[in-house]
Image (cartoon, grey):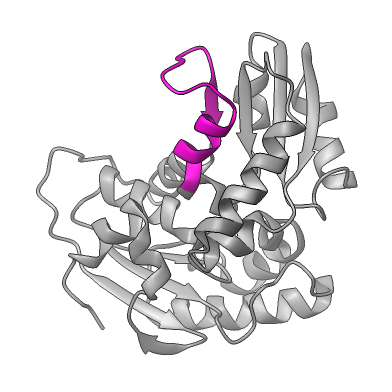
């Protein structure tokens, strides 16, 4: 079984690691776009073109499913990706985990890129899924780029700035960009909630990985030994995981996999 994941950069790592945990025997294809990143500032049309190129490179490896490991690409390019690849290759998008975070009400913060914060897309998700919760939208300028480039000082500054905008008694934080899941421990620490089980960080990786398996009728097998291989595509070219990816536990776990072609 082969599962492909796509993003502009290393934001696909959390979902890839989640797939590996659920199916250690699955071969993974990681298709990113270092030549065209970041995708966020691009027009929807330009972003969709870049996403289609990255998806086609992954599709050439004949995966059973393709995960779009990027919130922005899901918003703008998912219809085009599905129109081109489905039904041959199911395409699974990534949506911020607002619905599970809002269960039980209380104070919820949504950390997202400045472009997503306050957008019609995010406001629609809040309207549809955050019933009973008191939601604070928190823009995180520079955080995704700092994570992407393993800029520790940049991550620290961006996380601190976002934490200052977050209510101190928030009970859940939605990580509205897949890059943020790579620095969850730093986010929790900046909020002053280390070791506080009452604060839950809600990422999308586990749900997206599980949905990909459901779409192809595969069952999780987390107790199996890690035997799946790894192929890395960089703007369509065969490559290896970038150095920044290896700064995170998710990337290091994937690096040990044998290369596939």
Q: Give residue 42's quadrant in the image.
A: bottom right
Magenta run includes residue 73: no
Q: Residue at the spot x=64%, y=50% of the render? A: 157
Q: Is residue 110 above or below residue 22?
A: above
Q: Residue at the spot x=79%, y=23% of the render? A: 135
Q: Residue at the spot x=68%, y=34% of the render? A: 163
Q: Quadrant of the C terminus?
A: bottom left
Residue 122 left/right relative to 200: right
Furthest-left residue in view? 225
Along the line of sight, which residue is nearer the eye, 208 or 118? 118
Residue 127 left/right relative to 1: right
Q: Is residue 212 above or below residue 78?
A: above
Q: Is residue 209 above or below residue 86?
A: above
Q: Give the residues in magenta.
A: 183-202
Along the line of sight, which residue is nearer the eye, 171 or 162? 162
Picture coordinates of residue 55 (x, y %)?
A: 54, 75
Magenta run includes residue 193: yes
Along the line of sight, which residue is nearer the eye, 237 or 137? 137
């Amino acid at each position: 079984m082969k599962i492909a994941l796509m993003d502009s950069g290393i934001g696909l790592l959390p979902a890839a690691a989640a797939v590996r945990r659920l199916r250690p025997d699955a071969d993974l294809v990681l298709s990113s776009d270092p030549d065209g990143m970041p995708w966020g500032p691009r027009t929807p049309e330009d972003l969709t073109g870049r996403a289609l190129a990255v998806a086609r490179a992954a599709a050439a490896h004949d995966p059973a499913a393709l995960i779009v490991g990027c919130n922005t690409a899901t918003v703008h390019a998912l219809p085009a990706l599905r129109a081109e690849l489905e039904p041959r290759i199911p395409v699974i998008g990534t949506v911020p985990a607002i619905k599970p975070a809002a269960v039980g009400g209380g104070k919820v913060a949504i950390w997202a890129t400045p472009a997503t914060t306050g957008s019609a897309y995010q406001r629609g998700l809040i309207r549809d899924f955050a019933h009973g919760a008191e939601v604070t939208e928190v823009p995180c300028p520079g955080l995704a780029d700092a994570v992407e480039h393993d800029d520790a000082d940049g991550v620290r500054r961006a996380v601190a700035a976002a934490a200052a905008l977050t209510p101190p008694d928030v009970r859940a934080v939605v990580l509205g960009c897949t890059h943020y899941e790579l620095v969850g421990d730093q986010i929790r620490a900046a909020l002053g909630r280390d070791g506080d089980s009452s604060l839950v960080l809600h990422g999308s990786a586990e749900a997206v990985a599980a949905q990909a398996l459901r779409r192809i009728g595969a069952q999780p097998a987390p107790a199996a030994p890690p035997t799946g291989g790894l192929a890395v595509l960089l703007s369509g070219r065969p490559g290896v995981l970038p150095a920044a990816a290896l700064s995170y536990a998710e990337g290091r776990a994937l690096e040990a996999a044998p290369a596939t072609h």
